[in-house]
């Protein structure tokens, strides 16, 4: 130990009140969590901290998982590592836009000019949002996220995260935008990024493209509609569909190639009901003979299977759903008869729901609806943040290759996942299942406003049409740029939007396209090369299991392409927080709990205790009972430390601020230190395996036994100021206390630093993690069985007094101890007699495996 102390500063009444504010300020002033960038890479432990989405409030799930990471950071720091532990804010993207819209009562309209004097409504009305320019809207986004970040930081500090607050970033700041744009330009140069016009999953509410990783299935009511397609000279063909409103978009019928019912139809054509459009009958392996009638209509586009059929069967396109989710005004070219156009006119402009009702009425009138629709419940794809089912529309979008269409890339990314060390190990399976199940590349463009713009302009031809195949790109030195306001090289602003001029790419990057670069952004990639060399690849990526498919995978993709390596060596995956009904907590379900009330009610250390009790990868229920246990533990640490220090006294300290191991001579003291050495060894191994829960459990169990048994056993002897036996107890007490304060430091940092400060000078978080070897040396030939046996006898004596309803201070006439391990108990004879107030102790060897203790109490007075 390097700390120096000459006197104890123990308060008269230790309390948890005000402890967080006291130590947050002290840690800030001391810089105890500051990253030392003079350390070489082998002496650094770097963490790719998840940047929380700044669009509302933190919830208890954040507290849960971030506490896990913080215990690791604190452990590694005490192990002598310089810990690079930054904090980021994921502040761009749709969640922030929605919050700004509702908070200020505005909506973005890019067609409106910038108003430098704009002020949001004094009384915002989310239902009557004021349209404003994109630039005005982004300014409001910037303003609100700054305020939200302050609130988030305050909660993180209150929780005791040992973040170096000098190292923060936001995914929309200049450094992040430059990094995201630089990475994109390099992806583009290497052919990993590309633009394509293709069927795209589309959210009609937000009018933006959605990536595969952002989908979720939700059970929704629907109905099967049995309708007839006609063929010349043959029986009508019956199909069943849940989307009759897309009949005008039908381009083919499809059945399984081995389905005997339709062999004579393959290669022929049929006519659609109502619209009379001739479409081919095709064979494809994805058609399910067991579903409905076994033959289905292919529409452009009803679902992702339609896209696969359309692509692989090389079918035409007849889209009828627009970006707003309504049926477009003009019918497809082949819907050309007067009757067909009249029928289509009944659908034009209608929402999907209304169009379905009208189409069913048309089919019923034409006699092509067989029976009535059959109600069903089926999974429907939604954008994870959306409220309406997704549609599939044809749009021009940016993509990054991710193995969805390239077996070589897919295999390489699976290999990266196998090179990564996963905690728990089974989470790797989720990664591999996701990569193997990809059916397309990563769509990274979004038709939104508050995000990182694509650093691309397009020259316009003589008619003012963009030449997408000849983009204008900036020099990397100019990044970050915004093509909507910045001018490309060789052009002037007056040529924007003019024939033979230019136009900027109007889209922004998916928020994951920036977050996937969090290791590079935090590490100063091509901005601070010295820092980058000391921290990258990072040691740890902690995160939730639900974003393995998004954040973890996309980060691996970007690092694989840019650096030819993994972005980190290890990943720790937290489980979900469940509400009292054992349901996952999420904002969309409205069952989240914000942490501030719990922090104030139980203390930060108590909440951290509850969080640390949850293992990686294991779902954990919100349990206030466990928080109460954490508070009780925190108070016990205060009180037990005060008691132990008062018993040991300052005289037991050496010049280094610790106790002299050579002074520990008694068997019971050595036994306690031997047991403590086992605890330190187990806790260290647990932390090295990212099992913080095991480390806490071992430490806590020993602590309660130390308080309940050892302290009581040695208390009388420790007060003996003259004997070597008394000196042994006092030295053992201080050695154990030093270890326990450090063992608890990652879990309950406020209490740990409070009790440490009573007798040490520097922060416990700057102290060295305890080394089992130092306690084994102090223990000498100590045997933990001695402490176990003595504790067992003492508990038996207490039980007898309790059952007799006597005070623990009551005298005991006689105690007889029998068993194979009786000699272990005999070594603590004096301590047992003093703690149990036993006048006579008799130790009798026997063949009994367990100790048997007989207690004789004095006869009650008449």
Image (tube, rainbow, N blue to C red):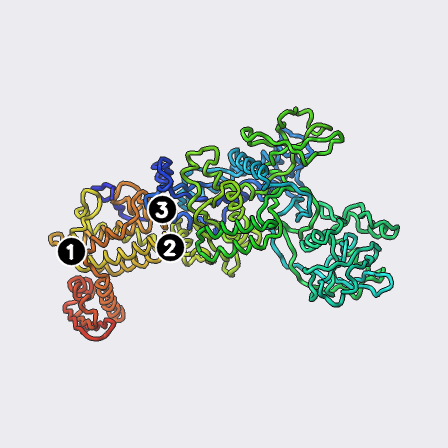
Depth check, front residue: 105 or 62? 62
For marks 1 and 3, give the one nearer the viewer. 3
Q: Quadrant of the C terminus?
A: bottom left
Does label 1 or label 3 sit earlier along the sequence?
3
Is residue 860 shown above or below 199?
Answer: below
Circle 2: is it few (<14), some (14-19), or many (20+) Cα within 10 Å? many
Residue 640 spot, x, y in % from top left = 27, 53
Residue 535 spot, x, y in % from top left = 42, 40
Residue placed under numbered mark 2 in the picture:
630
Depth check, front residue: 81 or 675? 81
Q: CA distance from mark 1 to mark 3?
A: 33 Å
Label 3 element class? helix
Q: For this view, does 665 lie left or right of residue 850?
A: left
Q: For this view, does 417 lie left or right of residue 669?
A: right
Label 1 element class? loop
Q: CA distance from mark 1 to mark 2?
A: 35 Å
Does label 1 or label 2 sit earlier along the sequence?
2
Task: Note whether residue 151 is visible.
Answer: no
Q: Quadrant of the N terminus?
A: top left
Depth check, front residue: 232 or 515? 232
For marks 1 and 2, give the one nearer the viewer. 1
The residue at the far left in this view is: 722
Residue 805 picture quarter? bottom left
Residue placed under numbered mark 3 in the picture:
76
Circle 1: is it few (<14), some (14-19), or many (20+) Cα within 10 Å? many
Do the CB atoms of the residues marked 1 and 2 lie less than 8 Å apart? Answer: no
Name the residue rendered at 21%, 73% in the picture: 854
Return the mark for residue 478. none
Is residue 645 shown above or below 219?
Answer: above
Does label 2 or label 3 sit earlier along the sequence?
3
Circle 3: is it few (<14), some (14-19), or many (20+) Cα within 10 Å? many
Residue placed under numbered mark 1 in the picture:
665
């Amino acid at each position: 130990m390097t700390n120096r102390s000459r006197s104890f500063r123990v308060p008269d009444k230790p309390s948890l009140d005000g402890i967080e504010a006291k130590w947050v300020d002290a840690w800030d002033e001391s810089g105890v969590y500051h990253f030392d960038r003079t350390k070489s890479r082998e002496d650094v432990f770097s963490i790719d901290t998840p940047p929380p989405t700044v669009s509302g409030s933190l919830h208890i799930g954040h507290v849960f998982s971030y506490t896990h990471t913080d215990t690791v950071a604190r452990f590694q720091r005490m192990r002598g590592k310089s810990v690079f532990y930054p904090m980021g804010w994921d502040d761009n993207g749709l969640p922030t836009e929605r919050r700004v819209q509702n908070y200020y009562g505005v909506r973005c309209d890019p067609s409106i000019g910038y108003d430098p004097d704009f002020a949001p409504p004094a009384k915002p009305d989310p239902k009557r949002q004021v349209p404003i320019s994109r630039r005005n809207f982004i300014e409001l986004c910037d303003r609100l996220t700054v305020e939200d970040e302050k609130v988030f930081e305050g909660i993180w500090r209150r929780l005791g995260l040992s973040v170096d607050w000098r190292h923060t970033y936001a995914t929309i700041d200049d450094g992040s935008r430059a990094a995201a744009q630089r990475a994109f330009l390099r992806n583009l140069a290497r052919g990993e990024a590309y633009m394509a016009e293709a069927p795209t999953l589309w959210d009609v509410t937000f009018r933006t493209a959605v990536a595969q990783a952002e989908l979720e299935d939700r059970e929704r009511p629907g109905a099967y509609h049995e309708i007839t397609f006609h063929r010349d000279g043959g029986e009508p063909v019956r199909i069943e569909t849940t989307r009759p409103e897309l009949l005008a978009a039908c381009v083919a019928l499809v059945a399984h190639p081995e389905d005997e019912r339709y062999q004579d139809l393959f290669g022929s054509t049929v006519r659609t009901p109502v619209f009379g459009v001739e479409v081919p009958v095709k064979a494809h392996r994805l058609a399910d003979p067991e579903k409905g009638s076994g033959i289905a209509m292919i529409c452009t586009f009803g679902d992702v299977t339609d896209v696969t059929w359309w692509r692989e069967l090389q079918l035409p396109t007849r889209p009828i759903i627009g970006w707003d989710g309504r049926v477009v005004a003009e019918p497809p070219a082949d819907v050309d008869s007067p009757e067909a156009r009249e029928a289509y006119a009944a659908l034009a402009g209608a929402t999907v729901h209304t169009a379905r009702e009208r189409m069913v009425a048309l089919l019923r009138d034409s006699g092509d609806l067989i029976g009535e629709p059959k109600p069903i419940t089926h999974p429907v794809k939604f954008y994870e943040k959306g409220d309406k089912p997704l549609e599939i529309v044809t749009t021009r979008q940016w993509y990054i290759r991710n193995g969805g269409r390239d077996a070589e890339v897919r295999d390489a990314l699976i290999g990266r996942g196998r090179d990564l060390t996963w905690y728990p190990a089974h989470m790797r399976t989720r990664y591999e299942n996701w990569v193997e199940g990809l059916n397309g590349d990563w769509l990274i463009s979004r038709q939104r406003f508050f995000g990182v713009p694509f650093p691309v302009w397009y020259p316009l031809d003589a008619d003012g049409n963009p030449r997408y195949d000849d983009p204008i790109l900036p020099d990397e030195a100019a990044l970050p740029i915004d093509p909507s306001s910045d001018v490309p090289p060789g052009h002037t602003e007056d040529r924007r939007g003019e024939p033979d001029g230019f136009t900027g790419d109007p889209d922004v990057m998916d928020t994951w396209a920036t977050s996937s670069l969090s290791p590079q952004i935090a590490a100063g990639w091509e901005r601070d090369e010295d820092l980058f060399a000391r921290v990258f690849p990072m040691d740890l990526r902690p995160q939730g299991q639900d974003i393995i498919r998004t954040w973890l995978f996309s980060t691996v993709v970007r690092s694989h392409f840019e650096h030819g390596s993994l972005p980190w060596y290890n990943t720790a995956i937290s489980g979900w927080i469940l509400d009292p009904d054992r349901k996952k907590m999420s904002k969309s379900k409205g069952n989240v709990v914000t942490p501030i009330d719990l922090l104030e009610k139980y203390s930060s250390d108590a909440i951290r205790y509850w969080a640390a009790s949850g293992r990686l990868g294991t779902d954990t229920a919100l349990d206030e009972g466990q928080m109460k246990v954490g508070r009780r533990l925190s108070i016990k640490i205060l009180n037990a430390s005060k008691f132990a220090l008062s018993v040991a006294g300052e005289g037991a300290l050496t010049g280094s601020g610790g106790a002299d191991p050579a002074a520990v001579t008694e068997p019971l003291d050595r036994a306690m230190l031997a047991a403590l050495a086992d605890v330190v060894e187990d806790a260290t191994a647990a932390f090295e395996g990212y099992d913080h829960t095991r480390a806490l459990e071992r430490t806590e169990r020993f602590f309660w036994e130390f308080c309940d048994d050892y302290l009581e056993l040695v208390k009388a002897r420790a007060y003996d100021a003259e004997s070597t036996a008394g000196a042994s107890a006092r030295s053992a007490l201080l050695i154990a206390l030093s270890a326990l304060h450090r063992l608890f430091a990652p879990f309950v940092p406020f209490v740990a630093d409070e009790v440490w400060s009573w007798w040490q000078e520097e922060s416990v978080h700057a102290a060295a993690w305890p080394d089992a070897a130092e306690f084994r040396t102090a223990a000498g030939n100590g045997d933990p069985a001695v402490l176990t046996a003595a504790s067992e006898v003492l508990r038996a004596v207490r039980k007898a007094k309790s059952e007799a309803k006597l005070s623990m201070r009551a005298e005991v006439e006689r105690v007889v101890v029998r068993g194979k391990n009786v000699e272990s108990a005999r070594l603590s004879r004096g301590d047992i007699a003093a703690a149990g107030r036993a006048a006579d102790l008799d130790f009798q060897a026997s063949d009994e495996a367990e100790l048997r203790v007989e207690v004789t109490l004095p006869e009650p007075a008449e």
